[in-house]
Amino acid sequence: MKVLDYRRLGWGAMGLCLCISSVLAGEVDQALIDRGRYVAAVSGCNDCHTPGYAQNDGQTPEAQWLTGDRLGWYGPWGTTYPSNLRLLAAQLDESQWIAMARNLKSLPPMPWFNLNRMSAEDSRALYHYLRFLGPAGEPAPAYQPPGVEPQSPHVTFPAGP
Ligand code: HEC
């Protein structure tokens, strides 16, 4: 019966290891998600990519964060709409997201030059936060070329300095 005892001991120890490692993994994920939530809030992504956020003092419920916006930004570049970042993250893996964020160039008023400077750690946290939120909402309306003033609500930029 000694053999059986050893086996039991082995399984018990293995179970304990698995339990500890899953607790640690859980903690790491939670920390990453919390950091991503923080990055989204303080780096301004919600201001444009979350409906109503800039107009309601940041009170949009988290369930709608980063689902994009139908408010157009009309200027000499045409009309752009803040993309649905939750749908975008759902299509990319972590390394694709980080590379996209580092190399993105887009039209105003997206501050792509700021996003390009985001650290890989913050970018990774933002990605995992977006994946944690999960895909939701609709794709943003399509870009419209210059000279066509949108009929739907939009912000108008001056022609330039
Ligand atoms: C001032 C408004 C504004 C802010 C702030 C802003 N964005 Fe954007 N973003 C936009 C607009 C508008 C577009 C669409 C640009 C275009 O069509 O070329 C866009 C596009 C993007 C895209 C490209 C999406 C695609 O489908 O290709 C990414 C990624 C993105 N933003 C991420 C972010 C992140 C991350 C933050 C915060 C660090 C952020 N944006 C902050 C307005 C903003």
Image (cartoon, rainbow, N blue to C red):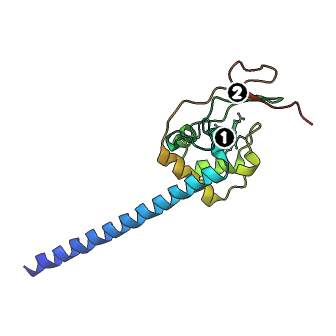
Q: Circle 2 sits on which residue?
A: 143
10 Å crowding of disc 2: few (<14), some (14-19), many (20+): some
- The residue furthest bottom is 2
- Provide residue 29's location: percent of width, then percent of height: 46, 59
Q: Taking 127 as reference, is 11 above or below it?
A: below
Looking at the picture, tell me which residue is in the foreground, 153 or 83. Answer: 153
Q: Is residue 86 or residue 18 the one in the foreground? A: 86
Compare marks 1 and 2 and give the one earlier in the sequence. 1
Quadrant in which the C terminus is drawn: top right
Residue 33 placement (x, y as % from top left): 51, 55
Q: Position of residue 113 (x, y in %)?
A: 76, 48
**Quarter assignment of residue 47:** top right
Q: Which mark is residue 42?
A: none
Where residue 91 sits: x, y (%)?
53, 40
For ligand 1, tell me if the residue under mark 2 lies within 8 Å. yes
Q: Residue at x 59, y 55 (%)?
A: 38
Tell me the amino acid under the disc marked 2: Tyr
Please state which of the two labelled residues, at mark 1 or mark 2, is closer to the viewer. 1
Label 1 to label 2: alpha-carbon separation: 21 Å
Q: Residue at x 52, y 52 (%)?
A: 128
**Looking at the image, which residue sits at the far left?**
1
Q: Mark 1: which amino acid?
A: Ala
Task: Using the rendered view, name the quadrant where residue 49 is placed.
Answer: top right
Q: Secondary structure at mark 2?
A: loop
Which quadrant of the figure shows ligand 1? top right
Residue receiving disc 1: 54
Q: Is residue 53 left or right of residue 8?
A: right
Residue at image x 67%, y 48%?
Answer: 44
Does 74 appear above or below 113? above
Residue 104 is drawn in which quadrant? top right
